[in-house]
Image (spheres, grey):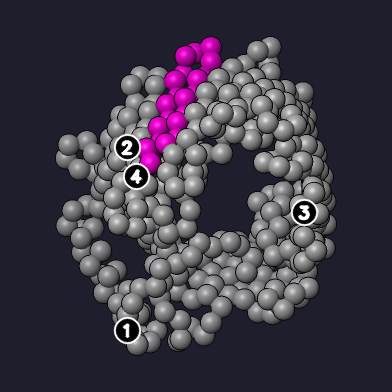
Amino acid sequence: MSAAHKDDQVLDLGSEKYSDYHSAILLASVALTAFAGAAAAEVSFGGDAAIGYIDGNTVANNGMYWNADLNVSASQELDNGLTAAASFHFNITDNDNVGGDPVTVGDDFVLSLTSATAGLVFGDTEFAAVSAWKSAGSMLRDGFREIGADETVLKGNVSFGSVEASVSYLVTAGNDLQGADIGVTADLGAATVVVAYQEAIGTADEILGLSAATTLGGADLTVAYAKTGDEDSIGAKVGYAMGDVKVTAFYVAESLGDDGYGVTVDYSAGALSVQGFYENVWNATVLEEEYRLQGQYDLGNGLVVTAGLIDGDDVADDDFANYLVAEYDLGGGASVLASFVDGKAGGVGSTDVDTFGGYELNDGTTLELSFAF
């Protein structure tokens, strides 16, 4: 497929076919509409769909693909200043005959209760530490855990003036709460300071991170410290804009392994955007070196062309991708995309190449028609 999807949980509707699924969704829509009218709630529906063809270099990355999703969001302002909200999505079809597909419920369900100064969020929301953390480049010891597929998080947020704090827990398979994560961000005027802490749970290590960001002489400066076990990372990152060009560079001192460094140059003027990137960092037991040169041009008639070269080399992997993308906006949320990728990852065809402009491309030639509603 052209985009990565999380594993979905099957909504068990027995042996009913698509017509029954349609009826069930229609009844749910009527119920939600009635509720919206009675309680003045805001309920909205959206969706997306795509159909495409891949001429790839592997058997698993060839032929037709298609998908369609229905997105639902609802919110209600309560009488006491709180706002209740929920969002979720149904996967209607995914690379199979529509009549034979079970409707599936995505694992991105989110339920929240918020006010102007506090909030409680449950579902597919990031842990507090990784949400607050601001790194200073590619630091080896700041690997705060991120929510994974089929995981659920309970997070509370509160703000006191210029200080925002949050705490989160992983909801385990047994519906228990484990592994406290804490994130605190304080805007001190001259600088913004972040404290992030992750409690050890399972294979996740205990991590403490401290960072501060400020602006000096027109340059954005970030310094950070992260500690995992007995090892730590100390990094500094600086970004400076000169007209249409912005240069960002970082250097990280590692207590174990070689130090890391990297530089990114961005150029943007009118319809043209170009990026050059180079990074040399120590990752666990291997040295990783990567560079990218990518550009995008908006022709102004609905057609956007993107091209680039990505190359990464280390002792465990040797990957690269040359790519060209042309996307034409048909209006109303519809677009046509054509791409060509000459890629390799570990000696096999790449099936998920992340590029400049946010595209996730397949190795080989791809044609896709997509819609957003």
Nearer to me, 20 or 192: 192
- Whether residue 102 is situated above or below residue 196 in the rendered picture: below
CA separation, marks 3 and 2?
40 Å
Question: What residue sits right under mark 4 in the picture?
Answer: 178
Foreground: disc 3 or disc 2 = 3
Nearer to me, 102 or 79: 102
Q: Earlier in the sequence, mark 1 or mark 2?
A: 1
Foreground: disc 1 or disc 4 = 4
Image coordinates of residue 249 in percent, x first then y, are: 74, 27
Q: Earlier in the sequence, mark 4 or mark 3?
A: 4
CA separation, marks 1 and 2?
37 Å
Q: Amino acid at mark 3?
A: Asp
Number of the label disc, if any, that sits on residue 224: none
For the question of whether residue 63 can be seen, the reply is yes
Query: Which range of residues does the magenta coloring cover?
Result: 178-199
- Whether residue 159 is situated above or below residue 316 in the rendered picture: above
Q: Residue 89: name its quadrant.
A: bottom left
Identify the residue at image location x=32%, y=84%.
14
